Image (spheres, rainbow, N blue to C red):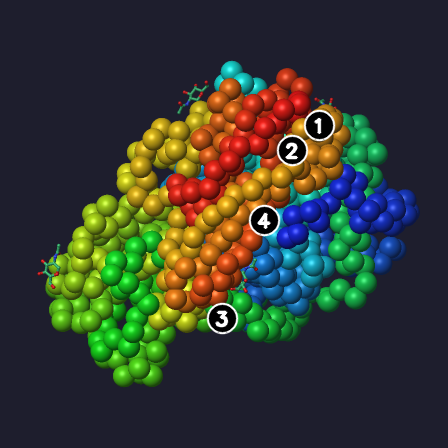
Amino acid sequence: MRKILSIVSVAFFAGRTRTCFAQIDSPEWTVAYSKAKVAVQTLSLSDKVALTTGPCTGNIPAISTINFPGLCLEDSPLGVRGADKVSAFPAGINAAATFNRTLMRARGSAMAAEFRGKGIHVQLGPMMNLMRTPASGRAWEGFGGDPYLSGEGAYETIMGIQSQGVQAVAKHLINNEQEHSRDASSSNVDDRYNAYVHHQQHEIYLHPFLRSVQANVAAVMCSYINGTYACESNSTLNGLLKTELAFQGYWQATHTTAASVNSGLDMTMPGAPFLFSIFGESLVLAVQLMKTVAEERITDMATRIMAAWYLLGQDTGYPEVNFDSRDILGIFPASKHVDVQGDHAKLIRTIGAASTVLLKNAHNALPLKLPKSIAVIGSGAGSNPSGPNSCLLNACNNGVLAMGWGSGTAGFPYLVAPLDALTTKAKKDGTQVTSALSDFDLQAAARAASGKEVAFVFITADSGENGQTVEGNAGDRNNLQAWHGGDALVQAVAHVNPNTVVIVNAVGPIIVEAWIDNPNVTALVWSGLPGQEAGDSLVDILYGDCVPSGRLPYTIGKSINDYPAQVDYTSSKATVHINYTEGLFVDYRHFDMENITPRFEFGFGLSYTQFEYSTLVLMGSPAGGVSRSGYGSSLDPKLHEKAVTVAFTLKNTGAISGHEIPQLYIALPALTNSPPSILKGFDSVFLAAGEVRAVTFQLSRYDLSVWSVVRQRWEVPNGAIGVMVGPSSRNLPLKATISAAGAK
Ligand SMILES: *[C@@H]1O[C@H](CO)[C@@H](O)[C@H](O)[C@H]1NC(C)=O
Ligand SMILES: *[C@@H]1O[C@H](CO)[C@@H](O)[C@H](O)[C@H]1NC(C)=O
Ligand SMILES: *[C@@H]1O[C@H](CO)[C@@H](O)[C@H](O)[C@H]1NC(C)=O
Ligand SMILES: *[C@@H]1O[C@H](CO)[C@@H](O)[C@H](O)[C@H]1NC(C)=O
Ligand SMILES: *[C@@H]1O[C@H](CO)[C@@H](O)[C@H](O)[C@H]1NC(C)=O
């Protein structure tokens, strides 16, 4: 996929309302468009082309005649890259693990406040490609292995970002699910998966982009698909995006001139001179001399870009750019080093804790109760001795792992190491702390752990963008094992300590079979990639100041071979064809379909309290909604209005207060050959000890539909649709069916 994405990195410096969605041609866009049309009318062809081209690092130039100050575009999906005095937020994968829309939106909003504070108009995120293969290098930037969860992550993040007047960019449309050969691969996605006509592309990969458009996303960034760069794929840009999703913003990143523009591309990724030559003067020539592009297309491109600028209100009172990403030495006079962090550290710590997934907790090993002694073991508990920003693009695994590597990173203002946070807590409690931070000195690890009340072992697994290779992993991971011999480290500690607590900081699943059933391993805590407050968030969970409610946004299998698809590691000059032959059966959909028992299923996570589910009631029917086809077909308001209300009772039967994450899955009729259960609802519900609450979910016709390739529209299938509710994808105690009679 996407030669262009690697160029993007070069260019960028070694760089609930569920009902409240945009309608087709939303009023907000209509107002923005009328302003944009007035402004663009007065522009010359060169001015219009300039709007679509970036001559310098992440900047679209100013056009003084219409008081347009230019645009500054900047990475990344987890914070401002290329600037100091900014925050390093939890990664997308951790935002997903919260299963909490409020926190997802708050994260987007806090990040965007920092982009705005630096004068940046466009945040190059969120990233919403699915974790199709468990070892995929950049999947941690996104929201995991499920389209619905990813869609909610994308929607809430964009609503948050754009609430600050910053333009969000949904990326990468589409099928950009591995790093190997991304410069020279084609994702071959079946139009039709099987006998029943529904669509892998629509039902799995496009959904997060649909939710992005519903959030009025300003821009979309492309990938490479079906042997065509998505930047010049007419079916992707003009077909999927601008017609079906009625997308009104603009679309960026390219490698050709006329072909891309004529297929619907609106802006090249500004930055490198090479790219300047793709659009810029070449585009003027394409219109005037070669006549391969019509001026109306250029006017449309400019109007879309201006409309997005008006949509976000960037025409009034927007801060000027006050940093320079090339200013590594801090000597550029224009860099004002504005501190934009506000009180975001608190939110980062909250999300860090809310995204921590408790996977094993034998004999209530956690939370800790004033332990007399603890041992802290493994390099992942400590700090990088050279500082948290000492590796270019975070491309190293040394010290606590709080984000992956590549352009999807931000500089750390500081990084709280677990050892430091545990030591601070231990001082208050009078707990003795012993540490052994070498991953390979197993004797030292055993000595430190021996005789201690609790032994914490930290293990990691890292990945990132393919521009860097870390410990032999060229972007994608080579396997799903813990790095640095993590299994041996856990075993050495568990051999001597009957209360071994394992903490995992990883970009995705790792195989834990070597030790998970060892009775001395009493607890497993999945900390993911929690951002700058890593240690503090962890201590909040370990000591029970926060009650765990995080859930796995992907499946942890017993073997890499249990997963439906793998990274294609082929290195070849010719195009590598990545065939999405698993169809609809991504992540848990495959485990369920093939009856493969995972170690920990999608949506799983323990609490320090217990919850009871009862009394499921369904009201309403999906009957009677025929969605339109053609322009805006996937945004049809009839399709998205409430059709079925699902209500049930949730009780906290334990002794302490906490959040439960109830999840709703549907089972489509057998003739659709669909996965056995499909996530279509979740919430994060706070219940005091003993409290009972009614919880409701709303399902739309869209939620209950499959894509008809023949009629090119969404349709509720005939037959009974199962509705299941419970605490994880494999623990669904409440079941009922909806009769979709008449729906067609
Ligand atoms: C990919 O190719 C298939 C088969 O030719 C086609 O049906 C499908 O629409 C293409 N997808 C895109 C996004 O171009
Ligand atoms: C491009 O896609 C649009 C929308 O699907 C379609 O109307 C148009 O005919 C396509 N153009 C080409 C050249 O295929
Ligand atoms: C568990 O720890 C004890 C030491 O407390 C040790 O004797 C025993 O061998 C360990 N068991 C395993 C399975 O490692
Ligand atoms: C993918 O499909 C193409 C075209 O059908 C085929 O040539 C290729 O061998 C397949 N690749 C793999 C890895 O199966
Ligand atoms: C989400 O998390 C916040 C912070 O922990 C909590 O206050 C809230 O109850 C949770 N649920 C929702 C739906 O916001």
- Label 3, label 2: how many angstroms apart (C-alpha)? 52 Å
Q: Secondary structure at mark 4?
A: strand
The residue nearer to you, when weighing 542 against 337, is 542
Q: Secondary structure at mark 3?
A: loop
Pointer 4 or 2: first along the chain: 2
Disc 1 and disc 2 in contact, CB within 8 angstroms: yes
Q: Looking at the image, which is closer to me, 616 or 415? A: 616
Residue 92 in the image, given as x and y percentages of width and height: 50, 53
* Residue annotated with mark 3: 413
How far is the residue under mark 4 from the one under mark 2? 15 Å
Q: Disc 2 beta carbon < 8 A from ligand 5? A: no
- Location of mark 1 (residue): 624
State ligand 4's quadrant. Answer: top left
Left or right: residue 148 compared with residue 398:
right
Q: Residue furthest front?
A: 615
Q: Earlier in the sequence, mark 1 or mark 4?
A: 1
Quadrant where the C terminus is found in the figure: top right
Mark 4 residue type:
Thr
> Closer to us: mark 1 or mark 3?
1
The residue that disc 4 covers is 696
Q: Is residue 375 above or below residue 426?
A: above
Query: Sequence-wise, which precedes: disc 3 or disc 2?
Result: 3
Q: Amino acid at mark 3?
A: Pro
| In the displayed structure image, the side of residue 156 where residue 190 appears, left or right | left
Q: Is residue 743 visible?
A: yes
Secondary structure under the numbered disc 2 in the rendered image: loop
Residue 344 in percent (x, y) is at 56, 69
Residue that label 2 marks: 621
